[in-house]
Image (spheres, helix red, strand yellow):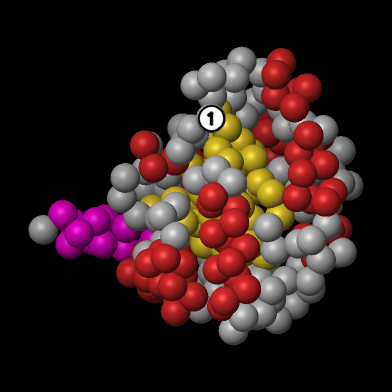
Amino acid sequence: MPGRVKSLKSSIQNPSFAVLIDPEKETDLSKLGKKIDLINQSLCALVLVGASSNLCNNFEEVTKFIQQRCDKPIIGFPGKWNQVNKYLDGLLFISLISSDRYKYLFQEQSKAIETIDKIESIDIYPTGYMVLDGGIETSVEKVSGSKGMRYDDISAILTRIKTGRFLGMDHIYLEAGSGAKSTVPCSLVSEVAQQVDSFLIVGGGVKSAEKVSEFWNAGAHLVVIGNAIEQDPNIINEISIKCQLHNEVELK
């Protein structure tokens, strides 16, 4: 275990983006292959692989397919412990800090340890996962039975995030939910970035390169896109251009 717990800060030093792939939705591997080709040609920092539900029967098969074709690091973003497999380069070891349910704060994670111990090459990224109310009931909320925290409940959000950080969670993931009606407010991202020293990930309902840029300006280190690619695959190229311009300005 020593040396396996790592921080994304060491490999992602400038603001970037990640693409989330849900194996449960990838029924056409040919189409998935084309998506991976776009990812390989982009400035995408990594690929997240995960599903909120436990209904995916081909999770490992799809992860293997991605791993064999993708040039980017493949990081697990598991909704269930059995989504951890040997085709992952790393794992967001998440604790649902927006919930009070022991099962998703600690218990579900402990079930993955036996599998993790058998995979020598997998890196572990301790992550506090904060689900916020993006205007729809997310898959995470349905599975966990936990309501997302309101955007305006800033004091409570910061308290939970700081608690997670003090417990050693180097990464904080602010999640509005897949297909959210409203994204995480940039003002909240900025508040968290200013008050908590962590690698800040933001996702949920991100539909444009401009919104990704706004999150970077607010202090996010990594912005996650998912459903938007299905509607407009070219968004990967648009975000890559924004990423290059943003980091050129940052370096000046």
Instruction: Please check the rendered image and state whether residue 141 is part of the magenta-colored stretch, yes or no.
Output: no
Residues drawn in magenta: 237-251
Residue at x-position 79% and y-position 71% = 147
Residue type, numbered disc 1: Val
Q: In this view, does 59 lie above or below 171?
A: above
Mark 1 falls on what kind of element?
loop
Residue at (62, 73) in percent of width and height: 156
Q: Residue 174: tell me if it is visible.
A: yes
**Which is more toward the observer, 201 or 102?**
102
User: Which x, y percent locates residue 129?
Assistant: 64, 55
Residue at 73% across, 32% down: 84
Label 1 neighbour load within 10 Å: few <14, some 14-19, many 20+:
some
As drawn, 6 above or below 212: above
Residue 63, image x, y percentages: 68, 33
Judged from this view, the residue extending furthest toward the bottom is 152
User: Depth check: 61 or 219 in front?
Assistant: 219
Q: Choose top left, top right, bottom left or bottom right for residue 227.
A: bottom right
Q: Does the magenta stretch include residue 248?
A: yes
- On screen, residue 205 above or below 75: below
